[in-house]
Image: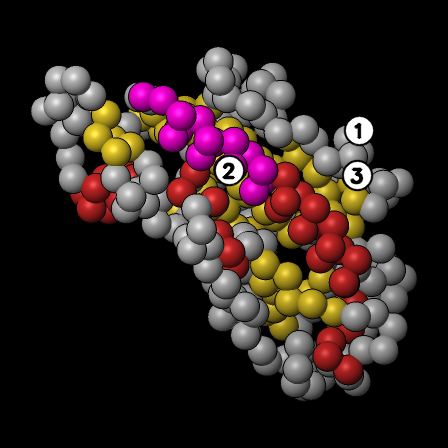
Amino acid sequence: MSRIIYTGAPANPRWSTNQPIFLGAQYQAGPVAVRQIANFGASSAAAVLGPDLIMPGQQGNNVPTAGGAPWDQLLVGGPPLTFTQDNTNNWIRGHLINGRWGGPGNTWQNLVPLTATANANHATVEGYMDAFLAASYAYETSGQRDAWYGLYYCVQSSANPFSDPTTTNNQNLYSYAPEFIRILWRAVRIVKPVNVSTATAAANIGAYPMNAVAAFPGGFVVPALPYAMNGNATLPPGNAAGGAVLGAIPAGFPAAQANGFDGGIEIHQN
């Protein structure tokens, strides 16, 4: 449960409820990417995630269902095969914002073709985010708090395709997949409303002041960085980090703080 400030109970100024305040992700997405002769794959997406998402029954599914050329249909003037027909790599429609967090699976605005390895590496990062949400939820429910601690997650696709520059053309299937996705994450402190109903808080969660977290309060246990991510700018390690990306970081996305959690990493296709 999340708690909101309620001054009508003198002995307990925090009113607790078992109705989640964060009913899902505050999700926003950029336009579909333009790759060769097709508009295909996500350019960028971001979401603010709250501690309630770690509660049993609150995470959804949103399995990927988007199709079309060149995913599962031939693209006129394009590659001679689709991603579902490729025998070199096992391709997955990877969410930029995980379906469990509310990221949609029925639109290419939130999906990109990822190799199975790249998708598994992204899952490692997502597991770290889940651990943070669990820490946030534990902190929220262990005392009287005047703010929620959430997570701002932003993913951008590379401008360059996965195909080698010398072979990038309309007929190369890998010209329609990004070389990498870049992930940035920030802890955010969201000021709680006073004397409002649970439904009102849930409906207006995006309007409450949200700030970067310079340092976590006492009692907030920041999860350890997964071994695979520790000291690595990319997954798999050894890839060259950097390069142009599509879309834009949201205007309210905070600068990284030296709080032991904020960071970023790139997930490369190879």
Mark 3 to mark 2: distance in Å? 20 Å
Q: Main secondary structure of the magenta part?
A: helix
Q: Which residue is mark 1?
A: 231
Q: Which residue is mark 2?
A: 133
Region of the chain picked out in magenta, as a range:
129-144
Mark 1 to mark 3: distance in Å? 8 Å
Tell me, yes or no, whether the highlighted magenta stretch contains residue 143.
Answer: yes
Q: Is residue 6 left or right of residue 163?
A: left
Q: Is residue 126 left or right of residue 226?
A: left
Check residue 228 in the rendering and tell me which mark sits there, or answer none. 3
Q: Is residue 111 left or right of residue 269?
A: left
> Badge 1, how many Cα within 10 Å: few under 14, some, many 20+?
few
In front of the other: 115 or 201: 201
Q: Is residue 141 above or below residue 115?
A: above
Q: Position of residue 135 (x, y in %)?
A: 52, 31
In this rendering, the count of numbered labels is 3
